[in-house]
Image (spheres, helix red, strand yellow):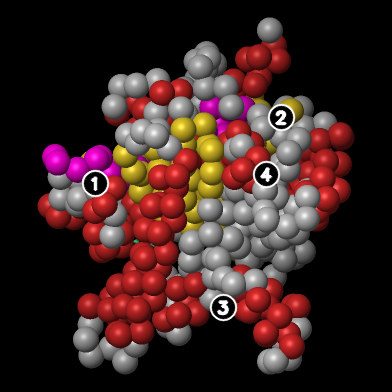
Amino acid sequence: MNNSSPVHINNNAILVINCGSSSLKFSLIQPESGNTLLSGLAECLSTPQASIKIKHSCKSNNSEQSESSALSAPFCHQQALNVLAKKLNTLNLVKNIIAVGHRVVHGGEQYSEPTLINIDVTNAIEKLAKLAPLHNPANLIGIKACQKDFAKLPQIAVFDTAFHQSMPEKAYLYGIPFELYTEHGIRRYGFHGTSHYFVANQVAKIINKPLAQCNLISAHLGNGCSVTVIKNGKSVDTSLGMTPLEGVMMGTRSGDIDAGIIFHLVEQLGYSIEQIDTLLNKKSGLLGVSQLSNDCRTLEAAMFDKDHPQSAQAKLALTVFCYRIAKSIASFSASLVELDGLIFTGGIGENSSWVRQEIIKLLGLLNFHVCEQANLTARFGTSGNIATSASRPCWVITTNEEWVIAQQSARLLTQESK
Ligand code: AMP
């Protein structure tokens, strides 16, 4: 990723689209400042409960307006985009939009940079759906719908795997027959790249070093979780793998398990492949161990309420979660000779003082020590270093993947126009 050239497009905005199978997240962002002019979410798409929520600032009284409405049949992505396009027109914002930037989950080995979408690129994204069957087809729905509603605007793909394309072979190869990589592309790709890149860049600014000289370990802890090690500004290893199932434990995903468990489930317990898929992707992680919830807030509330029937189980789930993350962070010391510090981001990383404290407590050997007061303060959008003065720094950074997509889309347009 080229992060050296500044973005020089004043007052223009990028429409950022993050399209899932049943949801569509959007924001209109000014790439230079990160200022969000409008944002929102369409949910429950393809069902009669489909709805859309749009937030935008109101110039006349400087307040924020929020509107929700139900979508009518056929409740699809295109319809949500039509509502959005109409709203952008009403607010006279269309004239500011210079491009649509799409988050695309899997770019395989082909895409390590933001890319102007043409027919070859849509075909490639479609082909890569075999590596990300839940995500790439949904991303394509968003691209195709935007090509209809915003036909005159350039459409740009920003890939979640792109930042990790700098990983060396030793990090991305699995210990399985080599032809599975060469013939079928089975290797680690990693995800959350845009988020890890953003927070690393923020820390580079805080410590006043060029990103290319920064050595960091970044923990993105949300519903999906990943740890990435960044050497001289580049991703050199990451915990998510060929799919977003590997690595640390997550909200509903198991993370690493002994692959032999899968044979055991099939041969001894009669599971089908479909049932194992659901088990490991949707019923495991914090939800599976706690038997209560995948939501960290719910688990913390239960853990602290000794009368809650699942109190002990909630604590157990959070304890396993923190231990596995600390283990992953410590293992990445094998990739570095210097370490500037650790970063926490994502819904849990940005807000859960308890989780951060538990993880840092396990990393004493790497000279990480938490400052309790700073850790309690760094929540709800407040960033900062939560380590003691004797410790290596541990920063809490609020991630902003949408802004990166807007910046990179704008930068690509500048390059294309030269
Ligand atoms: P994300 O996928 O990044 O939106 O993160 C979602 C996760 O962040 C969920 O597990 C939430 O429970 C967790 N989260 C959000 N706010 C808090 C909070 N105040 N304390 C603890 N966890 C939180």
Q: Count neighbours of disc 3 (C-alpha within 10 A) and say few if under 14, some if 14 to 19, many if 20 or more.
A: many
Dividing the image into 4 quarters, which one contains the C terminus? top right
The quarter of the image that holds ligand 1 is: bottom left
**Residue wearing tag 1:** 367
The amino acid pointed to by label 1 is Asn
First in sequence: mark 3 or mark 2?
2
Q: Position of residue 24 (x, y in %)?
A: 62, 53
**Residue 157 within the segment the image draws in magenta:** no
Of the image marks 1 and 2, the number of the one nearer the N terminus: 2
Residue type at mark 2: give it: Thr
Q: Can you tell which quarter of the image residue 363 is in?
A: bottom left
Question: Depth-wise, is mark 3 or mark 2 nearer the camera?
Answer: 3
- Mark 3 and mark 1: Cα distance apart in space: 35 Å
Residue contact between numbered discs 4 and 2, judged by CB atoms under 8 Å: no
Mark nearer the viewer, 3 or 4: 3
Q: Earlier in the sequence, mark 3 or mark 4?
A: 4
Badge nearest the viewer, 1 or 2: 1
Judging by the rendered image, the residue that carries numbered circle 3 is 283
> Percent from the top left, x then y, of residue 29?
51, 33
* Magenta region, residue range: 389-409
Amino acid identity at mark 4: Val
Of callouts 4 and 1, which one flags the residue occurring earlier in the amino acid sequence? 4
